[in-house]
Image (cartoon, helix red, strand yellow):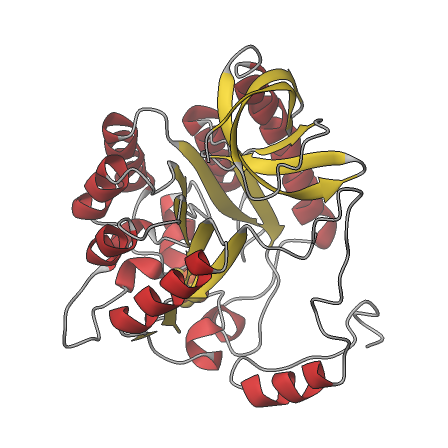
Amino acid sequence: SSIYPQVDFFFKPGELFAFIDWLNFLEPVTSGKYNNAGENLDFRACAYIPIIQGCNNFCSYCVVPYRRGRERSRPAQDIIIEAEELAARGVREVTLLGQNVNAYGKDLNARNDLSDLLSILNEIKGLYRIRFLTNHPKDMSPRLVKSIASLDKVCHHICIPLQSGNDNILKAMNRHYTLDQYRALIGRIREEITDVALGTDIIVGFPDESEEQYLCTYQAIEEIRFDTVHVAAYSPRVEAAAFNKFQDSVPAEIKMQRLLKIEKLQKGISDAINQNLVGTEMEILVEGVKNGKWYGRTYSDKLTFLQSSDNLLGQLVEVGINKATPWALQGNQVLLVYK
Ligand code: SF4
């Protein structure tokens, strides 16, 4: 707790029952926060559904395969029942979760893969949107890309971690793709899903990353133009392969400089992409209220604020976008309430 003073309790992923015991000591979560219209603000428009645990990929910087074990998919039927129950309770958007959702189903006898699962969930009444996190570039199949393009509820927003733009660093990370293969995947996705919004994760300062190797990553971000980039400085993990194999050789201040330069580059790119949306009309699923404004996300996962005296919670609305920043959009008027 001296390292992370903001953390009150820590539970390992397998300690579900300890977590439930602890929850029982707390006030009921639906203790009743109401807005002026008397509507219950604890209502959830969006929910997460875990579909696969663990990972078989063994990226050299990562502890997931050691801590959470090998890939274990939940039977499709369990996921479908959970999604149906959530939709019946008013949830309008579900995000399917897993360390590598592209591996979903490989370990099941039924052999339903993620595309099959998405097709079934797409039919659930009351559910408006489906998202999933996170993908691995080597495991993202052409079939999955086609499913995202063709299923109307599956959002056109995909997070595909690149991690580095340099092939030698990618090899040392044990990622099993090159920058060219990654580029080709992005090309195929953009061809099939023309309005796709792309997110990625980057690690800077991996052991022995030279300035030139770092610049490969910088240039890849400049070239590909993601909607969002999450950048982290490499930090050694005792259980991960890279810990024993490499020295954490890049000084902390260099890592920080590299991180900040990428954040600055991306801020400009995100701003340009979002400014292009000013003057357009976008569909928002309204999730809640913050500082007196309704907020929600577009189909492409852009956080959007709007003002309205109507109760829009859980509604799918069409909004005219009148302002944008690198991080969010603002809508001036609600043009249409769909559902
Ligand atoms: Fe698996 Fe992701 Fe960790 Fe790689 S980074 S081992 S894909 S969880």
**x and y, in percent, of residue 284 in the image:** 53, 32
Q: Residue furthest front?
A: 38
Q: Determine whether, in the image, residue 166 is placed left or right of residue 335.
A: left
Q: Front-most of 63 and 150?
A: 150
Q: How many marks?
A: 0
Q: Front-most of 234 and 41?
A: 41
**x and y, in percent, of residue 31 in the image:** 75, 67
Q: Residue furthest top?
A: 279
Residue 233 versus residue 187 in the image, above or below: below
* Residue shown at 14% from the left, 72% from the top: 110
Residue 123 versus residue 218 in the image, above or below: below
**x and y, in percent, of residue 195 in the image:** 36, 25
* Residue shown at 41% from the left, 48% from the top: 131
Q: Quadrant of ligand 1?
A: bottom left
Q: Front-most of 198 and 44?
A: 44
**x and y, in percent, of residue 40 in the image:** 69, 54
